[in-house]
Image (cartoon, coloured by chain):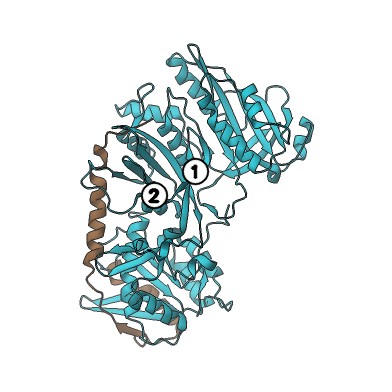
Chain colours: A brown, B cyan
Amino acid sequence: MPDARFGYPALVNKLDQVYGTDANANKQSITLRESKGVSKFLEDKKNWQKKSSEAKTSFK
Amino acid sequence: MPSIRTEGCIGAPEIKDARAPFSNFDFVEERFKSTHPKSLMPIKRILSRARMAEFQTITIEEIKSVGFSKEDDEELQVVGAKASGTLIRLGFFKKYITTPAEISSLTDSDFFGYAILKKIEIKDIANWIVFESVLGRVRHDNNYHHSLRDYRINIGGKEFNIKGNIYCQQNGLTNVCAHATLRACISSIVSDSDVSYKKMNTILKDKGIPHQLGEGLRVDQIKAVLEKLEINYKHYWYSEENKDRPNIPYHKFLYSSIESGFPALLGFTFGENDGHIISVLGHTFNEDTWVPNADVSYFQIGEDIRFVPSESWVSTYVCQDDNFGSDYCLPRLFNFKGDVHVFALQPKNSTYDAIDAEAVAADYLHDLVLSLNPNPDNKWLKRLREAVLIKDGWFVLRPLYLSGAQYYTHLENLKGWAEETIRKEVLEVLKEFLKGHYWVIEVSLPELFPANRRKLGEIVLNAEEPVATHKDLSSFVFARLVNEFTLLMRTDPSNLQVVKYESGISTHTNIFSHDTPV
């Protein structure tokens, strides 16, 4: 199983073959921003479920 | 197990002319006399919907109580209540007939649905309830239900098919609203069978948390049933008492389930610990709503991610309330006075939900758009860049859970505004590649999405791997932004590359559709 953290090089290779492109001609470097907002949101969201079992509500 | 849907009629069916001057009110009052008239509200609602569908004939059959209903009778007997042993099955048809023999000439398109009623007696009280009902859709063309199921019903010896969601009314003794709501929701996602009340009660008994006669079901009991049946869900509790309550609106969680074809249970309180719970199964869409223009409609994550969720165009959620009947509309911004609970049912194969997927996609989109030529030749790419970077989040995201085959078929059928399509040789590659389950987050513009249901592309995330809280590429598969397929590749820890391939489409395309509006 390829490590998805490296992307999907096998897919890139197949598409390179289809397009007949040089393996590196259509690639450019990119920098991903450090997205603290999204990381925090995903962490917060996990916490929202933690105490839900403490609810005493009875649905009738 | 025998089923009350296919059980044969005792004797011949009775045929009633439902056209004026036939009165639904008279019919209910004469046929289903009950000690508590409130118990008749669901059958009145069902008949009202049949009237809206311009039904012309009602078939009335007496059938034996079998299957789930018989199990229910046995549970009732244990607590001293009595069910009659037979049920009344009503069939609603949009065509006028006068004799039972004519039923064989009716077709599925004439059939609007059915309701099966049960009389329950305890001491000197006798009430009729709707044990189950499924109805077709009624005339509104802006209603969207993505979790409809086909039900086969025997009416007068002929089987008819109806596509809908099952509605059930509690008996108030051995089952309550939570049972009825669980049954409705579970039936809409389990294709081979439903779950009976007896099975739910057995699960609870086995877990050591039995349902007590006449009492409601608590949160832990609802969770126990869902978990035993291996149904993936997330539960959120909005309460002053809960310091870790969500800070996003409850309806966002409803939408996260519904738009991907899963129902949600929505609970609310009206006393300290007394609550009621209903099933939410669909939504309506208002293309002219002003809401997306309001600043509060933006979904903001941190300081630099914001966008307009596609949920902004939802005007109401379509729900069923076991006390009142099926297919009611609950306004999207309805403000409940007490606590609110959402049990958002989720895809089995996904480790994260639509809201996570949307947030991650928004984050990647921002970076991918930054990598675009500041002055792209393609005017739609230019408009997307402006929407994301200059107009401060004036773009739409719509998260969908799709299998590889569903997404591939969608790509295969995509057509640009000039009828252009995805390159065939690329489709061949993607057909082989798209084997798992994905979150496909559609990207559009607020002027484009509601008006003609079109989009500029999508971000594709792997639904089967846990979502990363930082961008390590473990979720990202690729993006299709207008005329470019965009992939990311890490060649070494410090070098990340973006790779782009021309898609064959240079304009906007249709969004994914589960079905036509119903």
Marker disc for residue B188: 1
Could one spot residue B464 in this view of the protein? Answer: no
Label 1: few (<14), some (14–19) or many (≥20) C-alpha neighbours in 10 Å: many
The answer to whether dots 1 and 2 both sit on one chain is yes
Q: Is residue B60 left or right of residue B464?
A: right
Quadrant of the rendered structure where residue B12 is?
top right
Q: Residue at x 20, y 46 (%)?
A: B243
Name the spot of residue B192 as percent of width and height, x first: 51, 41
- The count of marks equals 2
What's the residue type where badge 1 is placed? Ser
**Chain ID, mark 1:** B
Of the two numbered discs 1 and 2 on the same chain, state the one appearing first in sequence: 1
Question: Residue beneath label 2, please?
Answer: B346
- Measured Cα–Cα span from mark 1 to mark 2: 13 Å
**Taking B65 as reference, is B362 above or below it?**
below
Q: Secondary structure at mark 2?
A: loop
Q: Quadrant of the N terminus of chain B?
A: top right
Neighbourhood count class around disc 2 (C-alpha, 10 Å): few under 14, some 14–19, many 20 upward: many
Please tell me which residue lies in front, B352 or B397.
B397
* Residue B420 in picture, x, y percent from top left: 56, 78
Left or right of A55: which side holds B485? right
Nearer to the camera, B462 or B92: B92
Residue type beneath disc 2: Gln
Question: What's the mark number on residue B232?
Answer: none
